[in-house]
Amino acid sequence: MSDPTRAPTPMTLRLYAGATTLLGPATSLLTRRRVARGKEDPERIQERRGQATAERPPGRLVWLHGASVGEFLSIVPLVERLQARHATVLVTTVTRSAAQLAARRLPAGAIHQFMPWDVPSYVQRFLDHWQPDLAVFAESELWPNLIMRTTARGTPLIQVNGRMSERSFRGWQRVPRSIGALLSRFELCLMQTVDDARRVEVLGAPRVSTTGNLKYDVPPPPVDRGAAAALADAIGRRPVLLAASTHPGEDEIVLAAHRRMAPQLANLLTIIAPRHPERGPAICALAEADNLAVVLRSTGRLPDQRTAVYVADTLGEMGLFYRAAPVALLGGSLIRHGGQNPIEAAKLGAAILHGPHVANFAEVYALLDARHATTAVEDGDSLAEAALALMTDRAMRTRQRDAAMDVVTSMGGALDRTLAAIEPYFLSLSVRGRA
């Protein structure tokens, strides 16, 4: 394996390390604010300072990092495959929602910790405790201190499911020596698309391969059978529209579509699942202002026959709601957020609607749109029109669902390609372990 520590460190990265050292005490104020907003777990805040809350087991340890929910889910199959090779796996995340999901979805034996803030002393404390033998970062995590200090220890660092948007590419081009020094520290960059691979190569990554998107290989989320049966009984034969992972500004559009459809769809039920569950009460207030009967799932109640809007303000239950709704709008796409991942919805058989803003998953949506596997909408009126058509025309809905399933199935295989690329590094750990 190469020795990335030989690359010189640009002045910008040395200044960054110095600045984050000086700003370290300020993380206490930031932490308090994030705890007050529900963004951090107050019981585990020491992990953000690199203080472990679990022991390091003996033997080989592979560290996998996925910042948020999507990145975490993409690496769960990797966790399972690495455990099958008799490695201990440490998984780190940044967001609280990803940590809560990890508690339910990580296989037995895997360890979860929060990623430390990118402060040199915190990073060093984290690394001194866990002593990873191999580090694997998902998607676009480029924290300078973490990268520099991990590789300075001789730990091989690999990027998987890598992304580099055109916007990020242009930004990094303004500091070519800095990004070149960071990317040179990666033993291997395994990118989702040819365009992603080209961008990181131009920026200085020495070893790049296109392996595809791991999210195509993530199995559909599990569902509690009792919860599914209870929700199905509560809904009965009512028509259902799901608005999945909505962001502020989209709920009003969904409610307007509901009001327009309701006269033509008797007893219509709209389920709104906000991307951030803490917004549930605010969505309830919007529905009540429109004189719509609304129920909040976090209260433990199911929708009854009077309920017009069911606000699904819980974590880890999207599999339940996709299974309950024949038609789903993917949120983050009616506003300039960039859209949410449609793969999960396609695998669970939902007919997918999306707005014009899908840059976060442009390749996936382009494939789906080209196969007429999704329907694009612009506003409340077009959402109502498209949803009504799909909900009343079973043949149209089936064609769209089948096309979406074909697309996501045909795009699988990234997991096997990723594991094949990582295998030599994992084997080198086995050799070192026997030496």
Image (cartoon, grey):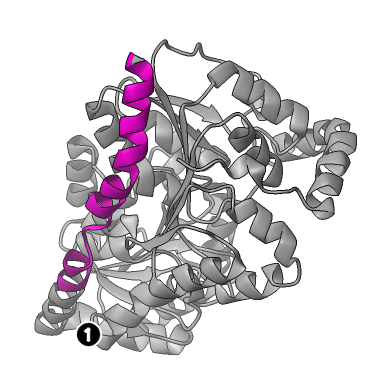
**Left or right relative to 153: residue 20:** right
Locate residue 60, reporting x and y percent.
Answer: 39, 20
Q: What's the amino acid at mark 1?
A: Arg
**Residue plotted at (40% across, 69% down):** 330
Q: Specify few, some or many for label 1: CA neighbours under 10 Å numbering under 14, 14-19, or 20 or more.
A: some
Locate residue 155, reporting x and y percent.
Answer: 53, 32
Q: Which residue is mark 1?
A: 371
Image: 151 above or below 126: below
**Residue plotted at (50% across, 79% down):** 357
Foreground pick, 37 / 416: 416
The quarter of the picture where the C terminus appears is top left
Q: Is residue 106 visible?
A: no
Q: Which span is picked out in magenta?
A: 406-434
Foreground pick, 254 / 214: 214
Count of numbered labels shown in the rendering:
1
Q: Secondary structure at mark 1?
A: loop
